[in-house]
Image (spheres, rainbow, N blue to C red):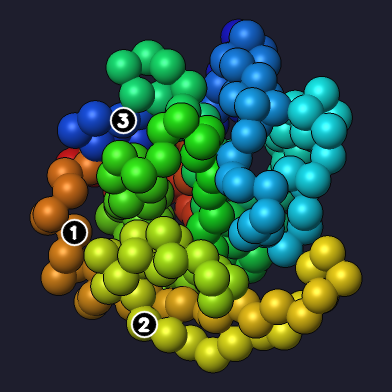
Amino acid sequence: MLIDHWPLLGLRLNTPCLELRLPTDSELADLADLAGEGVHQPDRMPFLVPWTDLPPAERARSVVQHHWLRRGNWSPGDWALNLAVFENGRVVGLQTIAARDFAVLREVTTASWLGARYQRRGIGTEMRAAVLHLAFAGLDALEATSGAFEDNAASFAVSRRHGYELDGIDRHVVRGRPVTNRRLRLTRDAWQARAARIPASVSGLTPCLSMFGLPMVRSAPEMM
């Protein structure tokens, strides 16, 4: 079976209202359709790579291609897990958790997007809670990083709820204009102080450990 060769297919993250997992082909098509409908207002650009400026059909196709790319390029030293987010069985967005040299640095980074019709409902906070639980409780991470442009109040609000602190700035050019990205960092202790606010669980992790660069022999119970 394919899951024997790609155990990430069996990985499940759950919160009170959401499930995060790799999508099937038909669910990936649903995710692409959702991106094609729109992710943000046209006068804004929350992403460093402005992929949402593409026409709807190309935008949808880029979601599929990026998903395949990250699966194909996966290595224990450089990985990005693109998890579809489901609410009541319906795809509502994408949550990514990624790392380089995780076995040594024990640091992850996160990124995400939600379909426009699912925003401002607290889903972003809950899906971030799920991957932070995977990082800290499941993979024994020490720190998690994120970031957002100065005008992205919604993203900053999600990070504040989870205890991130400011960690400096980066300057970039997006759409031909200078933008300031504010980096954010969450320590293990800060996460533990708030983790109970949104219960989360992880299942199917043990067979995946080597794919994250971790030894299979270490204990990895199904984390609640």
Question: Residue 138: x, y in percent?
Answer: 34, 50
**Residue lying at 65% horizontally and 57% vertically, measured from the top left:** 44
Amino acid identity at mark 1: Ala
**Residue lying at 34% horizontally and 24% vertically, measured from the top left:** 87
Question: Residue 129: x, y in percent?
Answer: 31, 51
Question: Which of the two labelled residues, at mark 3 and mark 1, occupies the earlier sequence position?
Answer: 3
Q: Is residue 50 in view from this perspective?
A: yes
Amino acid identity at mark 3: Leu
Name the residue that disc number 1 marks: 195
Q: Is residue 87 above or below residue 180?
A: above
Question: Which of the two labelled residues, at mark 1 and mark 2, occupies the earlier sequence position?
Answer: 2
Name the residue that disc number 2 marks: 165
Q: Is residue 64 in view from this perspective?
A: no
Kindly report the distance in space between the C-alpha atoms of the residues bearing marks 3 and 1: 16 Å
Residue 18 numbered mark, or none: 3
The quarter of the rendered structure image containing the C terminus is top left
Asked which secondary structure carries label 3, the reply is strand
Kindly report the distance in space between the C-alpha atoms of the residues bearing marks 2 and 3: 26 Å
Asked which secondary structure carries label 2, the reply is strand
Horizontal relation, residue 101 to residue 189: left or right: right
Nearer the observer: mark 1 or 2; the answer is: 2
Question: Which of the two labelled residues, at mark 2 and mark 3, occupies the earlier sequence position?
Answer: 3
User: Toward which corner of the image does residue 122 lie, by quadrant?
Assistant: top left
Q: Pick whichever, 33 or 201, lies toward us.
A: 33
Q: Pick whichever, 19 or 216, lies toward us.
A: 19
Question: Residue 105: x, y in percent?
Answer: 54, 75
Neighbor class of circle 1 (other Cα within 10 Å; few <14, some 14-19, many 20+) is: some
